[in-house]
Every structure is written in structure tokens, then in C-alpha cells.
Amino acid sequence: MTGVFDGAGLVELAQRVTKPAHLVAHERDGALGLSERPIPGAVGTVPALYPEWLGDQSFTETHDVRFPYVAGEMAHGITGVELVEPMARAEMLAFFGAAGLGLERLDRELERLRTRLAGRRNWGVNLIHHPDDAAMEDAVAARLLRAGVPKISLSAFLDITPAVVRCAASGLRTDATGRIIRKTALFAKVSRPETAELFMSPPPPGLVRRLVDTGEITEEEGRLVSRIPVADDITVEADSGGHTDGRPLVSILPAVLSLARRKSPGVRVGAAGGLGDPAAVSAAFALGAAYVLTGSVNQMSHEAAVSDEAKAMLAQAGVADVAMAPAGDMFELGAKVQVLRRGTMFAGRAARLYQLYLEHPSLDSLPAEARDSLEREVLGAGLDEVWQRTEEYWAQRCPSEITRAQADPRHRMALVFRWYLGNSVTWAVDGTPGRRSDYQLWCGPAAGAFNTWTAGSFLAEPGGRTVTQIARNLLRGAAVLTRVHQLRALGVRLPSDAFDFRPRPLV
């Protein structure tokens, strides 16, 4: 049998990653080709490569998964039980998106997760930072610990808070060899090295002491947590949907990896943001990521808890069809989220609200023309009506916000504007009629990359876009591209088609 040196046959052999590739030299000019079996004159062999082998093997061993892949949390339960469960059963990991949910609903969803995934530890729930509501942050943390959630993903934290330390310390013990064993695995999402360093370090001693003194953690838990990093897995979030600093993955990931090697070698560093096709996933692993975490692409999956109309809008997105808009949960701080621009006017309308907030001290100070335009074109209701709804919400959630608003007209204005920002998510999730132009859909360039890659394939169809097929195809494609790059580096002259992995049903 002779080798294959060009054409479709060479592409097929190069992409057959689960089989070894044997390198053979052409008798005439020494050009390298491939053979599926060893033959006389073979000059080398590239071993088989499985998607399971990408990333850090300690990640899969520690977290009881087969693949180094995580479906990240999307707030308001968009990453819901129906998405987390199939990922866990497919031997991957997913985080339930608890941010934005009330405590009663969170309790119900936690019970569903515990029931459906009994005996499994490859699932988790999100804990998001609440800069203006520490009580809510503490309450969510307490519920996650009480429910025995095996893994917690910490997001939007700029510092270590009591809730974070409580999650890190709860249930710590040592085994017979003295090794510290975690009951709850912590992941921390970061977008800058200085924040990553906080989670790679033990928690602040003063904070640990305070929690011990108040009885929130035991003396032994306080002693043990002071000897380990706050989190063992750091997810570097680059240009992602939702909260993002928009930093390029190729710049921020190596910086955090370098910090981890110097500061805490046992911490694993994963990659998120912009991972919408196999090339991006392969690049993340090539940069040194221990695992990858996807978000935007999963929002288009069959299991995502967002309306079909919203999914159809996301399916039309290109890589440039995104924009930055004020964040509802950190509105007064000026924080922004990345959202879908195409097909919705949310980003522009939200920016207009923030500009009014900056320029005026209160709702009463708004010019009549601006007030009328705001009520008709953005809120869809009178300001007095919106404030009444806002007051009813905060009376249940956090009455102190109402007290503050009564004393501070500017804060009252912020709460009214946040009513629009918060409801725009609900409208997208529910597919509220008449509110399509106000949908807030967290989305990064990865959505456009995914749509480009899947065009014309079974993953272009809504029914084929299951979260597990998305994951398996991204991983298989990443393995194919890793193999192809290996072969090219060894001197095999591959046609450009070799770098094009097309989606296909995988098991």
C-alpha cells in the first residue's frame, strides 16, 4: 500500500484523529504524505488523539468528567435544569445560572437538580457577586451549601467576600495522608490577573477570623482554608457575552497562566469567551487552557431556557452583531454587558437611560420632551406606573432599597431605569409579544463564529442544536485541528480543506 500525498484522501487521513497517522516520504521528491497503516519507508507516526485528551487530565479526574468542557452559567436560569442534566449525563460539566432568580425559585430549582442528578458530582450552580446587596449574596451561598451543590462558579467578583470564603471553607477536611479535601469545588471567573491572584491565594486572614468568630465556619475549617487557594479552577473570561472586559484571549490567558505557575502551580486555568468554533477551542488548548467554558453558543441550544424567537435572533448573528450596554445589576457603577445588537434596539435604549442618569439628578428634573419620549419609546409605560412596579418588586426583595430611594431621588431614578434593564431579560426569556425590540440577549462574537461554522450543517437547524452535540462537535473539531497543525509542523503539506471540520452527529 502506498501513501497519500494530496487531495481528499490526504484530508481524510489527517482528520481521522482516533487512529494513528503514519508519515511516508514520496520516492520522487521526498514530500511527506500519510498512510493509515505502517508501510516500508515510513518515517514516523503521529499517535491517535481523542477529544478527551485535550486540556489538563487532572481536570477530568478531579471533576468526574470525561471531557475538559464546561457549559457556563447563563443568568435567569437560561442555563437551567434541562441543560445541566444532559451535560452531566454526557460526562461533561455545566453550571446552573442562578443569577437574577428569586430565592424561592432557586430553592425549587436546587431540589430539581438534586433529584435528577442524585449520585453525580459533575454539575454546579453559579454564585454571582451582589455589590449592593451582600445579604442576597450570603443567602444564595447558604442555600447552595445547604443543598450540597458539588461545584460553585463564582462570577463578577472583584474581591473576596464573606460568602466566597464560606463556600471555600465549608466541609473542608483532611484525609489519612494530611491532604486537604474539598467538599465543594470552587471555580472563579476572572478577566484580569490581579483578580485571578486573589482566588489563587488563601483568603484574607481577617475575614477568616471573622467567620470563625461568628460561627459561620468552624475553627478547623478556618485553619484549613488558610492553607489553600480560594479556588482550584480559574476561568479566564475574555471577549464573552454578558459581563466582560473584552480582553483578547491570546493576551489575558497566557498572563494568568504565567501567574498561576509562579503563584499557585496546583491551580488549573481554563478559557472562556469567543469560543464559537473548533479553531477557537483548539487555540485555547494550544495556549495552555486546562479546560474550556462556552456560553453564547449554548444559548442557541434546544435546551436553553430562552424563547424560540430569541434563539432565532441569535441564529442570525454575525461576529460583528454585538454591542456593549449598561449592566442592570451594576448600573450605577457604569458596568457594561455585551449583548446582541442585530434585531433589537436594547443596547441603544439602555445607553440612553444611562446618559439620562448621568445628566439629571432625578426623574422630576427630566425635560418634558425627554420624559415623554422615554415613556413612549423605551419603557412602554408611564414613569409613575414603572415606579409603582419597581416599588412592589423591591418591597419583596430588599425593602431598604425603597427607603434609600425615598431619601435619594437619583437612586430612585436608577431603580426605575433598572426596571427596564431587568425586564428586558425576562421579555427575551418569555418571548413577550410586542417587546422583541427590547430583548436583552447576552451574546459575544462567538455566536457569529458558531453560525458561520455551522451554516449548511445539521447544527444549523434548531432541532439539531442540542447542548451535547454542540459540545461534542466543538471538541472533536478542536482535536482535528490540533492533529492537522501537528502534521503541518512536521512537514506534511496539507490542503486548506484539512482545516475545515464540518459538524456531524456524534455519540
Image (cartoon, rainbow, N blue to C red):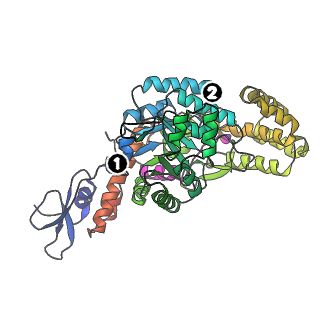
Q: Residue 128, labelled with which disc?
A: none
Image side of residue 379 versus residue 77, left or right = right
Residue 41: give x, y in percent of width and height. Answer: 11, 68
Residue 407: give x, y in percent of width and height. Answer: 87, 37
Residue 142: give x, y in percent of width and height. Answer: 59, 30
Q: Residue at x 77, y 29 (%)?
A: 399
Tag 2's secondary structure? helix
Residue 485: give x, y in percent of width and height. Answer: 33, 63
Does 334 lie within the magenta span? no
Q: Residue at x 48, y 53 (%)?
A: 449
Closer-to-camera residue (87/484): 87
| Residue 76 seen in this snapshot | yes
Name the residue that disc number 1 marks: 57
The residue most toward the bottom is 29
Image side of residue 490 versus residue 190, left or right = left
Does 441 lie within the magenta span? yes
Q: Please name the amino acid that badge 2 sits on.
A: Leu
Q: Is residue 284 above or below residue 182?
A: below
Q: Quadrant of the N terminus?
A: bottom left
Asked if disc 2 and disc 1 are in contact, CB closer than 8 Å, the reply is no
Front label number (2 vs 1): 1
Image side of residue 341 versus residue 181, left or right = right
Q: Residues within 10 Å of mark 1 (few under 14, many from 20)?
A: some
Tag 1's secondary structure? helix
Q: CA distance from mark 2 to mark 1?
A: 36 Å
Name the residue that disc number 2 marks: 103
Q: Residue 213, located in which quarter of the rendered image?
A: top right
Closer-to-camera residue (411/294): 411
Q: Residue at x 60, y 25 (%)?
A: 105
> Which region is colored magenta?
437-458
Q: Please name the amino acid that badge 1 sits on.
A: Gln
Earlier residue among tags 2 and 1:
1
